[in-house]
Image: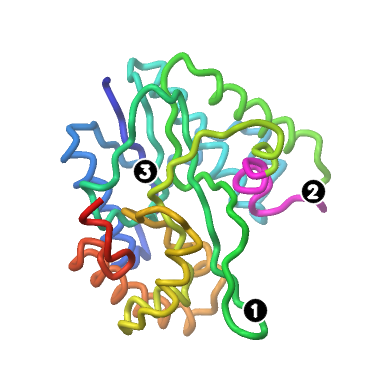
Amino acid sequence: MRTLILQSYRQDDVPEWIRLCLDSVDAWAKSYQFDYEFLDDRFFGYAPAWFTKKCGTEHFYPVADIARLHALRERLQQGYDRAIWFDADVLVFAPSALQIISGSGYAFCHEVVLWVRPDGFAPGAPSINNSVMVFEKGNPMLDFYLFAAEEIVRHREIAKFSRTMIGPKFLTDLACAMPINRLIHVGLFTPPLMAAFASGDAGLPAMYRRAFGYPIAAANLCHFLRGAAQPAERAALDTVFLGAARRLLESAGSVANPQINGQ
C-alpha cells in the first residue's frame, strides 16, 4: 500500500521540542518505508478562500483543520493508497509499537485529557481528536468529513465559532451517532504530564496510563497551549517540554508506559 505521511509547521520560531517531534515522525515513516512530505505555511493555501475569509485571523484552528483535509484528499487523488496526517507536535517515542494497520479505511485518535481540578488532577472521558488521521483511497469518510466541516463553518455564526468545532468536538459528537475507527496508541500529554516526565515523577503518568487504557507509543503534546501563553510562560513551557521529549525518546516510551516495549 503506497502511503504518505504529511505534516506542516512554520519555518520561524520553531521550538527545539517541535523539531524533535517532526524528526521522530519522519524517522518513523522511513522505518516503514512510507513517503514523507513536509509543508510550510503555504499549507494554509489548501483552505478554500471563502472559508479562510469567514474564519479571519481570529479563528486560526478551523482553517488548519480544513487545509489538512484538502491536502490529504489531493495526495490520494495523486495516486497514494493511503494518506496520514500527523500534527507537528506529535512525538513518536516507541516507533515499533506505533503500527497503522491497513484495511480500516480511516481512523482518528483515541483521546483522554488529564484535567486540572480544584482538588488535583482527573482524567476526562474518552473522546476523539484529529492530531493523527488516516484516510485510504475509496473510503467515503474523508469526503464526508470535508463536506460536514465546511457546512458547519458556512452556516455557523462567527460568535459561535470555537477552536475545536470541526476537530475534536465534531468528531467526538459524531462518535455518539456512529462507530468511529480509532488509533489507540497515540496519547495526549498536557503540560502537567510533561512536567512529570521531565522531573521523573511517576504518579501522574501512571494515572494517565490507567485512564488511557492502551500502550502509548506516541503523543500529541498540546502545542496550542504554547501559542496561548505569554512569552515568559512560553519559554518555561519550552524548557519543560524539551526535557520531557528527550526523556520519552531516550527511554523509548518506558517513562510513559513501562510495558510498551513488551507489547
The residue closer to the viewer here, 110 or 39, is 110
Residue carrying label 2: 158
Determine the CA span between mark 2 and mark 1: 30 Å
Residue carrying label 3: 7
Looking at the picture, how far across and down is residue 16, in whole percent? 29, 67
Extent of the magenta region = 159-172
The kind of secondary structure element at disc 2 is helix
Answer yes or no: do the residues labelled 2 and 1 have beta carbons within 8 Å? Answer: no
Give the crowd class for mark 2: few <14, some 14-19, many >=20 residues within 10 Å: few
Determine the CA span between mark 1 and mark 3: 33 Å
Residue at image x 54%, y 68%? 114
Look at the image and say whether residue 170 sits in the magenta stretch.
yes
Residue at image x 27%, y 21%? 2
> Relative to 80, is 161 on the left or the right?
right
Q: Quadrant of the N terminus?
A: top left
The kind of secondary structure element at disc 1 is strand
Q: Is residue 258 above or below residue 200?
A: above
Give the crowd class for mark 3: few <14, some 14-19, many >=20 residues within 10 Å: many
Residue at image x 33%, y 35%? 100
Determine the CA span between mark 3 and mark 2: 28 Å
Residue carrying label 1: 117
Q: Amino acid at mark 1?
A: Arg
N-terminal label among 1 and 3: 3
Answer yes or no: do the residues labelled 1 and 3 have beta carbons within 8 Å? Answer: no
